[in-house]
Image (cartoon, rainbow, N blue to C red):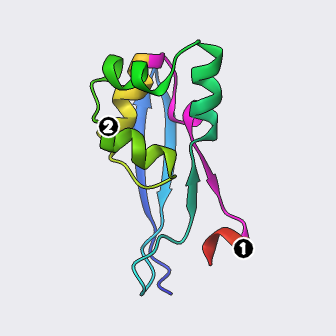
């Protein structure tokens, strides 16, 4: 596997959030798995359901389905959700770097 790593820096209130984007492996699958379980817990705390989030954030049903399955979505979608819920990326997602998730 290649050792290339790409770093993206997003500024928010003079704090830096750095994301490491891993390259895809030869089979086309991501080297790491993203979990949106924090998003679903946050929705429960805010007494919202997925349909209400979809409407408030202005995203499609396909996006909600992808999030439910832990699949990739664009940064724009994540930004819309964070703006709607008044939170950061780390509040709605986490990266599972365990050996089992990379298989």
Residue 58: give its label.
Answer: none
Residue 76 picture quarter: top left
Which residue does the image show at 50% across and 52% down from the upper left? 69
**103 relative position to 24: left or right:** right
Distance in Å between CA atoms under marks 2 and 1? 31 Å
**Left or right, residue 53 beside residue 36:** left
Tally of marks = 2
The image shows residue 50 at horizontal and vertical percentages of 46, 27
Residue under label 2: 61
> What is the quadrant of residue 72 in the picture?
bottom left
Rendered view: 65 above or below 88: below
Residue 79: % across, % down: 36, 31
Residue 87 included in the magenta stretch of the image = yes
Give the camera-side residue of 67 and 32: 67
Q: Which residues are magenta?
A: 85-98
Residue 99: which disc?
A: 1
């Amino acid at each position: 596997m290649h050792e290339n790593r790409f770093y993206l820096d997003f500024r928010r209130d003079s704090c830096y959030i750095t994301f490491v984007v891993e390259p895809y492996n030869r089979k086309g699958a991501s080297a790491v798995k993203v979990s949106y379980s924090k998003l679903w817990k946050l929705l429960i705390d805010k007494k919202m359901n997925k349909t209400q989030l979809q409407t408030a954030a202005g995203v499609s049903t396909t996006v909600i389905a992808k999030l439910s399955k832990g699949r990739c979505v664009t940064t724009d979608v994540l930004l819309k959700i964070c703006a709607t819920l008044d939170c950061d990326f780390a509040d709605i997602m986490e990266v599972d770097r365990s050996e089992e998730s990379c298989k």
